[in-house]
Amino acid sequence: MAVNLISKLKNEWASLSGNTRFLRICMGIVIYIVAVSVLVLADLPASDKFEVGRPAPWTVKANRYVQVTDNAATLKDKEEAAKRVPLVEYVSTQALDISKKNLQQTFDLIAQAKSKHSGKKFSEAEISELAERVPLNLSFSLVQTLLNADPTSLEQYHTNSEHILSIVMQTGVRDNELKEASQRIEQEAKSLPGLTSAKADIDASLAQAALVPNKFPDLQATQKAKARAMDSVEPRMRDIQRGQVILREGELVGEEDLTVIKALGIAKQGITINQIITYCTLLLIMGLVVQFYFKLYLPHVHGNPRLLFGFAFLSIIFIIAARYSGGVSPYLMPITFTSMLVSILLDSRLALMMVSVLGIYAGLMTQSLDSVIVVIITGMVSALAVQNTKKRWNVVTASLLVWAVNVAVVLLLSLNGNGDYQKSIMNALLYGGLNGLVPALLAAGALPFLESACQVTTHIKMLELANPDEPALHELLNKAPGTYQHSIMVANLAEAAAQAIGADFMLCRAGAYYHDLGKIKQPNMFVENQTAHENPHDKLPPSISAMIIISHVTQGQELAKQYKLPPELAKFITEHHGTNLASFFYQKAKAQEDDPVFAEDFTYPGPRPQSKETAIVMICDGIEAAARTLPSPNRESLKNLIEKIVANIINNHQLDECPLSLKDINTIKASVLRSLTSHYHNRIAYPDAKSLRKSKPQK
């Protein structure tokens, strides 16, 4: 039962392993968990805490130069700035409206009283009673004057008093400014044109009676103004020099001491729930950005579990290593190792994107801008320095450039925060060297193992596979020397053509070396390896000959597995003939045999070229083989041959499934013509020794 369960689990895992999406999600979750865990662990407090008001657990000395905010001095500056802020006031429009309303009601009551008396004289009691009823505090004599005035005069008193009141109150009247405002009313009344002194006094008295304060303090606005003034104050900074004693063991920890200790990163106070939420959210956003970048720009990596494994592995290596190296110095982030390997194994664009993301992560981990700058600049230089690496030694030589840049960056950052030039130079040489040369040496050593684990064929690996001492090529050279020479020529043509259109020329060269590997099995059946005048195919039926010729593709596949060739090179074996027809033997069969001849029996198994590189090798293979048959390979005959071969390939739909454009095809034809013309150039006919003796002048 246990055996069945284990077997079932194995089958389930095998099924899941074939699901790229499932593996991609699993690797993403693993990276996410590791990244969050490392950030949280980096913010855990030390076992011996520094707490305000408690004795320091040990003597604290500054391990580097830092600047910290002088909170006491900064607070004092903020308080002074707040004191300088004037009181903010506002003018109430509602107060003036109420005063105007009181004036209106007063004149309405006067008018009503006059209409009821119909010209009769008012008694003192009636005047006093009316003076108490009106909303304004008017004197007996002023009410009497208004009652005795004609309608036109009343209207003028109303208009003038309201006008004067509006002028005085529009700029605002404080509670303690009523006396000054009353004086202004008198001045405004006297300044009105066409009024007698008596009427001006009446207008002034009415306006003074309606006058109320309408300018009040705005406490909320004042507080906001004070807050803005305090916020605008630049913080006072304190310089903490390296080696300076901050606290001695047993001394009570103060607020300022704790600020310095936090800035130095000597002791952390722990992590909060808000920080954990922030970390989780930021890393989730960063992960989604990486996911969309893969999908949009690197689909070949996005759909390849092994490449994704390489990316995940290198990311986790950086995250874990940065946890410890960053604690020593922000200049020791191990980005060189990660960036170089991602650029070589996967893609330089991916390396640049990865460096940006890891730079942000390093900043979150160390809370240091210096680490962000070091990671991004050093990482980008590392990725670009190995972009076109062709030898393993190039990784080491590229590290010299990385080392130089890293030293310069560390020196500038160190000088920015420290006036000690000697110390800054020593830091730059030490940390620059450790973060430049050492990771590059480690990357060069790890590269072969990661190439194998990720099944990636780098340019370095291709160059090694193109070495004639490689077992497969060595056997090809010994057993099928003609095929080997043909492959060398095809490689030269393909490499030049690939460079002309911007394709992977190293892949083209290596692929061309191995494209006819299957001819090792029966080398004498191929014309380039036949040294005698007798052709074995003359004694064989065309169908058998075709089967033998076509079989070099399937036999090549078997040999590719035997020699463990990378899949990128094995594709050239299957795709360099595509689904073309072995036309010579097909036509021969049709001419010799009475029975029906089927084209399918004379067709290569394919597939058609799926990439620019395999398509280039198909074109160059056909042209090079045909060029050998030309009786006089001059430029014109070579050009016609190239046009004919390429036209046949296109007409047979062999390029339908590869991304070559018409422009690319024309560029390839021009490149192949240049290469062949150079190879078949006219040579000078040198005279032999006998001719030279005959032509020697006599003495």
Image: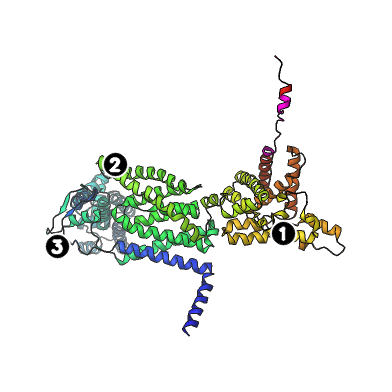
Looking at the image, which residue is at 78% across and 56% down?
537
- Give the residue furthest to the top: 699
User: In the image, which is nearer the foreground, mark 3 or mark 2?
Assistant: 2
Left or right of residue 443: residue 590 = right
Left or right of residue 331: residue 205 = left
Inspect the image, locate mark 1, and give the three-letter code of the amino acid beneath it. Answer: Ile
Please say whether residue 643 is one of the residues in the magenta stretch: no
Q: Which residues are magenta?
A: 677-692
Please say whether residue 686 is one of the residues in the magenta stretch: yes
Q: Position of residue 389 (x, y in %)?
A: 49, 47
Find the distance from the CA under tag 1 to the CA under tag 3. 87 Å
Find the distance from the CA under tag 3 to the CA under tag 2. 39 Å
User: In the image, which is nearer the foreground, mark 1 or mark 3?
Assistant: 1
Say what secondary structure mark 2 lies in: helix
Q: Which mark is residue 425?
A: 2
**Contact between labelled residues 3 and 1, with CB atoms less than 8 Å apart:** no
Name the one closer to the observer, 358 or 401: 401
Inspect the image, locate mark 3, and give the three-letter code of the amino acid beneath it. Answer: Arg
Q: How is the image coloured?
A: rainbow
- Count of numbered badges drawn on the protein: 3
Dot placed on the residue nearer the N-terminal end, 1 or 2? 2
Dot placed on the residue nearer the N-terminal end, 1 or 3? 3
Dot placed on the residue nearer the N-terminal end, 3 or 2? 3
Q: Which mark is residue 378?
A: none
Q: Which residue is mark 1?
A: 550
Left or right of residue 457: residue 228 = left
Q: Position of residue 12 (x, y in %)?
A: 51, 76
Q: Position of residue 611 (x, y in %)?
A: 62, 54
Q: Which residue is mark 3?
A: 54
Looking at the image, which residue is at 75% across and 51% down?
648
Say what secondary structure mark 3 lies in: loop
